[in-house]
């Protein structure tokens, strides 16, 4: 009997709950959209990140086949005789030579892999073609190639076609003898893959006699003796490394970048959680009367708790599902932004499709559901714990809120202090940095409601004689309904603060980069062999061309640069070898120390310079040494000083060319900086250089000083494009939050407004009250966002950026930016007020009052 | 002594080999020559054009002819032998290096890896006591020192499988090859002179001119050395046999395969005989052989001089029935031999599947009892 009754009661409760939700469709919809957007951002960022990383890993795996180890060389690769000795003297059968390079054809980046098909078959197919006579053609016919089928179809090419590919600044015509089709891997794995016989690869990369690396399949345990034998047989410039450590070292390069993106996504979710909290609070508050009545009628607390929490769960589930769907769509767009940045800054990766994988989806779903439930927990608990009598009385609610706010403020202070203390821990962990960042901003947003209350009180006290009745009503309304307005303001504040913080960080960063470009880029014209991304293939300039350019009249001096990546174990180190002709002043800005003596040590070849990020990441200081694997074996180089550089986040070793030549066989030059005599026209030299290059059959990339600065900044802006997108999305979530809050607030006050109307307040005045109220809310959010944003920016600049990339930068605070943030906050709030105002002014007072 | 050799298949062998290898790595359907018109058409199109053919009698020169003849499409250095430890533990071994031209002519490209010549090698060991047959296959191009053949000083190699002359004037060679837990290291000292097979070294395989090879052998080579299996090292002695053959096309289209015998008898005689089988089941009249006397004197054998009877058949688990035991009568010499395999399962399931294994011989010449060892190769049975 009791059970039947309980069941029926539950049914009624559920019906009441459902009816309530359906009666407030806009509120439901906005909440769902808000949470869904938060989740969508997380999913999108995660998917895009993972797609880029996966594409990279898959292509690495595809390229290294089943290789467990690799023999790698110095900047100029390996001597091919190492492979012959490996085969004929050590009998290492599971070995295959590889020559790798990046080329371009039209808009496509092609990843050239030169292989020995005869050795490769043993290595496990790295290309799945079974077309007739292909191997024979590859080996015996020069300039024959296999092209990845998806890439070929995009380029409108097929078997038997010829196409142009540009490699290391020269164009070659290749003949497609077969298409590479995906085997048990996805199409993304082979995207952009161009396979030739090693003979053709050597010929078209002009890498005669050299290999990029040798793949080995070794069972390190079973073949321990063999591993030792191979190591012992290698010359000083070669090293045997596990294949996995190599691809890890490459993947590691972009890790900081990806972590930062993820944090941006989390920020959006936190804003989304505020929104849930806000909505759930409303859903409880609006039904206080109903809930109180239900309790009086004998509904238990437990039942009430269950019903409201299941409402939250329902909202959470629907929002999560929607969020996942939007996230996938959003991810399609983001993946290109992420990929472009990774290509610009790290390594060449070809991603054409978003890889849908379960992990990011599950992660986001858990975050979404968990976040919704946590955010809904407090209001639900409150609803359940409130005594029926208290629930039926309105005034207890706001009284209760005020108690709650003081507790919240204390919690905020605790969080803020914890965040500060965390910052004091001397560490390089990015994770710790982000934790303290979140603690700080969460703490500040917890303190927001109290600040709102104080501000409103101050305002009203000051304005009691100065403001008219409608203004006072509007302002008091904010603190009177603090349980509703507080969270909305906090959410908007958080979003705007993020904008401020990130803007300041980007501005500071950009101005440091501009400053760095000014000091470093001193040559009038920069010239380089087109090189696609980093990696182990380096385009070089024709030596005859360099001589001809140097002897052009009008050239005062030349700097010759060569940038290579040195692999040793799991570490990749970029080395920049430079030579200045006499009279040219190197334009590097040194961090501390005595510049003249540092330059002297550097130019004498006594020591090298390291860039700031390298010094930071490896904990290096002037006077320390850095070990590099040279062609003469491992060698420790003394560090004369540290210089500012924003060109590479891994950092660089700057080495005088003569010193480099002592330790490396590589004699190529990758780029030139041309210094002109006074009065010489940049354009005329550019024309002459172009003519010389055409004569030498060398493709070159030629940029004037101005162009290169613009180009660098263009890459910089491209890198942060994704940040802008994420910021906008966070604002959108906050906007929806404030819209929800306002609508709930205004509709709930329908009666109050109706009374006002009945007492003679015009619809225009009602609209004014509402607009004023929201405007003040926006203003408060904007004002609180400024200190929060400033804190955020300083943590981003001095903690997050430093720990992620090792760059130090001067913080640059643009007052206009702060002003813009306030405008943004007020604007968003006012925009959100339009619909509620319109609706309120159109409601007939009699109708609203009749509900009494 | 050919693995597979009709007109299309000789050149096809290599391409086929590669295709099979590739298809083994991928999950695509099996590719068979019959099932793939593309391959045959490709081969028909330039057929043997551009290659030199074995058409007329030539003068052999040594040591030059121990080296490669890259103008011909195919060539091999075929070492087989029967060896035993002092305790009588019997081993058979095979090390063969094949050369294939993928294209006629030499290359003039700048990369050292550019070549038209590739090598394939098979290594096999018959361990009679363990009843075990091991075989391995390797490929490499004739470039950057990975594989090749040189006449003086003699050296033929692919990776670390090699035969080379010892650095003195003794005419001795060393043969070395290892794979997994097997290592063979042998010293080879020829005890008979070089024998030119067929008509002064021109060995015709069919009626049409040019379907022939240049073929010489060293039929008795004193051999000693070690065979190492894992931790176990066996000192062995015995006899080896070398076959050298190069050609551009050999078999006719109606020929299906062959049974090839290299026998070393206790009375000092050696015998080489190949029987070409036609697709209709008949025996090719061009089947022939040579009987080599203890001092190296030779007698040419024709199809009508030999009577062959199958004594036992072994069915390959991979498909195909091989006549692994034979009775052979050599009429002009009055020899009557029973040829039985040391192991039934001596099939090489390599890119091209064939049976090649050590055999023991019991028989008589008139009243005299005769014994011996040899190698038997059978092609064209695999299904």
Image (cartoon, coloured by chain):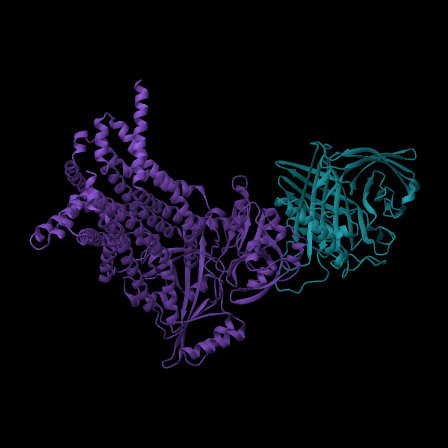
Chain colours: A purple, B cyan
Q: Is residue A424 visible?
A: no
In the rendered image, which quarter contains the C terminus of chain B? top right
Is B23 displayed left or right of B244 in the figure?
left
Q: How many marks?
A: 0
| Pick the front one: A229 or A299 | A299
Say if B39 sits above or below A546 in the image. above
* Residue that protrudes farthest toward the left in the picture: A465
Please name whichever residue, A394 or B191, is drawn nearer the observer in this view of the structure: A394
Residue drawn at 62 percent across, 64 percent down:
B110
Front-lying residue, A619 or A316: A316
* Residue B265 picture quarter: top right
**Relative to A726, B97 lies left or right:** right
Q: Choose top left, top right, bottom left or bottom right for residue B45.
A: bottom right
* Residue A277 in sight in this render: yes
* A713 on left or right of A776: right
- Residue A469 image position (x, y, % from top left): 11, 51
Q: Residue furthest top?
A: A1
Residue A369 image position (x, y, % from top left): 34, 38
Q: Give the residue furthest to the front.
A: A846
Judge left or right: residue B325 versus residue A166: right
Frontmost residue, B131 versus A688: A688
- Residue A466, how many percent across, how many down? 8, 55
Instruction: List x then y, in percent, for residue A15.
Output: 32, 32
């Amino acid at each position: 009997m009791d059970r039947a009754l309980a069941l029926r009661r539950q049914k009624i409760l559920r019906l009441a709950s459902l009816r309530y939700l359906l009666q407030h469709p806009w509120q439901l919809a906005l909440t769902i959209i808000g949470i869904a957007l938060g989740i969508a951002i997380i999913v999108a960022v995660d998917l895009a990140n993972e797609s880029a990383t996966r594409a990279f890993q898959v292509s690495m795996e595809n390229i290294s086949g089943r290789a467990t180890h690799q023999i790698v060389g110095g900047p100029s690769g390996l001597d091919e005789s190492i492979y012959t000795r490996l085969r004929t003297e050590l009998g290492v059968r599971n070995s295959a030579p590889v020559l790798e390079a990046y080329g371009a054809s039209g808009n496509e980046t092609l990843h050239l892999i030169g292989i020995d098909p005869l050795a490769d078959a043993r290595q496990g197919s790295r290309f799945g073609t079974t077309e007739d006579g292909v191997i024979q053609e590859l080996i015996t016919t020069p300039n024959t190639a296999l092209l990845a089928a998806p890439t070929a179809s995009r380029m409108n090419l097929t078997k038997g076609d010829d196409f142009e590919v540009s490699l290391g600044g020269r164009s070659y015509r290749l003949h497609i003898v077969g298409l590479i089709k995906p085997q048990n891997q996805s199409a993304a794995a082979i995207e952009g893959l161009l396979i030739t016989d090693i003979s053709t690869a050597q010929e078209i990369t002009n890498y005669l006699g050299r290999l990029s690396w040798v793949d080995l399949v070794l069972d390190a345990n079973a073949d321990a003796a063999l591993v030792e034998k191979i190591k012992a047989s290698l010359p000083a410039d070669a090293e045997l490394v596990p294949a996995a450590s190599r691809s890890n070292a490459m993947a590691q390069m972009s890790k900081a970048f990806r972590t930062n993106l993820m944090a941006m996504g989390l920020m959006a979710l936190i804003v989304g959680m505020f929104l849930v909290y806000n909505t759930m609070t409303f859903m409880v508050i609006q039904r206080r009367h109903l809930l109180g009545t239900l309790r009086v009628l004998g509904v238990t607390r437990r039942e009430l708790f269950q019903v409201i929490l299941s409402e939250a769960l329902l909202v959470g589930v629907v929002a999560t599902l929607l969020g996942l769907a939007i996230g996938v769509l959003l991810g399609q767009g983001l993946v290109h932004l992420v990929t472009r940045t990774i290509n610009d800054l790290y390594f060449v990766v070809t991603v054409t499709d978003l890889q849908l994988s379960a992990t990011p989806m599950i992660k986001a779903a858990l975050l979404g559901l968990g976040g919704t439930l946590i955010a809904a927990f407090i209001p639900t608990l409150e609803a359940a714990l409130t005594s029926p009598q208290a629930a039926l009385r309105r005034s207890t609610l706001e009284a209760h809120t005020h108690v709650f706010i003081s507790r919240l403020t204390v919690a905020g202070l605790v969080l803020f202090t914890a965040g500060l203390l965390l910052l004091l821990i001397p560490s390089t962990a990015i994770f710790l940095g982000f934790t303290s960042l979140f603690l700080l901003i969460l703490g500040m947003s917890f303190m927001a409601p109290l600040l709102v209350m104080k501000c409103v009180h101050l305002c009203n006290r000051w304005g009691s004689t100065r403001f008219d009745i409608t203004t006072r009503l509007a302002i008091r309304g904010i603190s009177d309904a603090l349980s509703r307005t507080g969270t909305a303001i906090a959410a908007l504040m958080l979003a705007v603060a993020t904008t401020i913080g990130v803007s300041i960080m980007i501005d500071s960063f950009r101005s440091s980069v501009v400053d760095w470009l000014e000091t470093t880029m001193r040559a009038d014209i920069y010239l380089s062999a087109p090189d696609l991304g980093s990696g182990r293939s380096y385009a070089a300039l024709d030596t005859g061309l360099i001589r001809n350019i140097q002897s052009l009249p009008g050239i005062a001096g030349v700097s010759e640069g060569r940038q290579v990546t040195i692999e040793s174990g799991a570490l990749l180190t970029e080395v920049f070898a430079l030579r200045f002709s006499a009279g040219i002043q190197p334009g590097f800005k040194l961090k501390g120390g005595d510049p003249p003596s540092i330059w002297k040590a550097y130019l004498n070849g006594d020591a090298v310079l390291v860039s700031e990020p390298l010094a930071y990441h490896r904990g290096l200081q002037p006077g320390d040494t850095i070990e590099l694997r040279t062609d003469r074996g491992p060698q420790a180089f003394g560090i004369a000083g540290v210089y500012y550089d924003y060109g590479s986040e891994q950092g660089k070793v700057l080495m005088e060319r003569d010193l480099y030549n002592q330790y490396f066989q590589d004699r190529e030059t990758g780029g030139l900086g041309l210094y002109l005599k006074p009065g010489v026209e940049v354009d005329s030299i550019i024309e002459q250089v172009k003519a010389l290059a055409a004569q030498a059959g060398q493709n070159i990339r030629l940029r004037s000083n101005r162009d290169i600065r613009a180009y660098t900044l263009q890459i910089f802006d491209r890198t942060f494009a994704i940040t802008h997108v994420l910021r906008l999305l966070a604002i959108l979530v906050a906007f929806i939050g404030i819209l929800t809050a306002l609508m709930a607030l205004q509709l709930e006050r329908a009666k109050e407004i109706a009374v006002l109307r009945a007492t003679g307040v015009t619809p225009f005045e009602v609209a004014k009250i509402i607009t004023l109220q929201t405007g003040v809310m926006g203003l408060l959010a904007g004002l609180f966002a400024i200190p929060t944003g400033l804190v955020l920016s300083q943590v981003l600049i001095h903690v997050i950026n430093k720990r992620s990339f090792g760059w130090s930068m001067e913080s640059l605070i643009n007052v206009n930016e702060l002003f813009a943030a306030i405008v943004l906050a007020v604007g968003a709030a006012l925009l959100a007020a339009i619909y509620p105002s319109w609706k309120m002014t159109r409601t007939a007072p009699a109708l609203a009052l009749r509900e009494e | 002594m050919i693995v597979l050799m009709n007109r299309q298949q000789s050149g096809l062998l290599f391409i086929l080999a590669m295709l099979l290898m590739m298809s083994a790595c991928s999950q695509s359907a099996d590719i068979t020559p019959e099932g793939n018109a593309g391959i045959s058409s490709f081969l028909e199109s330039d057929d043997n054009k551009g290659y030199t053919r074995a058409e007329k009698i030539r003068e052999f020169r040594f040591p030059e002819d121990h080296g490669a003849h890259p103008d011909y499409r195919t060539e091999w250095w075929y070492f087989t032998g029967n060896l035993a430890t002092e305790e009588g533990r019997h081993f058979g071994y095979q090390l063969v290096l094949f050369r294939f031209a993928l294209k006629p002519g030499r290359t003039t490209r700048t990369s050292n890896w550019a070549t038209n010549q590739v090598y394939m090698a098979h290594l096999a060991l018959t361990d009679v006591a363990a009843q075990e047959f091991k075989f391995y296959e390797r490929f490499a191009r004739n470039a950057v020192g990975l594989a090749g053949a040189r006449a003086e000083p003699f050296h033929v190699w692919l990776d670390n499988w090699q035969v080379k002359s010892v650095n003195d004037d003794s005419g001795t060679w060393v043969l070395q090859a290892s794979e997994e837990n097997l290592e063979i290291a042998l010293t080879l000292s020829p005890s008979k002179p070089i024998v030119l097979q067929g008509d002064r070294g021109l060995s015709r395989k069919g009626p049409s001119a040019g379907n022939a090879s240049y073929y010489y052998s060293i039929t008795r080579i004193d051999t000693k050395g070690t065979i190492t299996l894992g931790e176990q090292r066996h000192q062995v002695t015995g006899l080896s046999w070398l076959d050298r053959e190069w050609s551009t096309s050999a078999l006719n289209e109606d020929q299906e395969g062959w049974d090839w015998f290299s026998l070393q008898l206790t009375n000092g005689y050696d015998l080489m005989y190949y029987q070409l089988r036609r697709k209709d089941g008949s025996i090719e009249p061009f089947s022939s052989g040579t009987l080599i006397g203890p001092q190296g004197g030779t007698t040419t054998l024709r199809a009508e001089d030999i009577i062959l009877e199958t004594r036992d058949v072994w069915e390959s688990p991979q498909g195909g029935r091989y006549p692994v035991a034979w009775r052979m009568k050599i009429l002009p010499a009055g020899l009557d031999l029973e040829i039985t395999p040391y192991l039934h399962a001596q099939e090489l399931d390599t890119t091209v599947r064939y049976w090649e294994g050590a055999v023991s011989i019991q028989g008589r010449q008139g009243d005299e009892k005769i014994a011996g060892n040899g190698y038997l190769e059978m092609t064209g049975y695999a299904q």
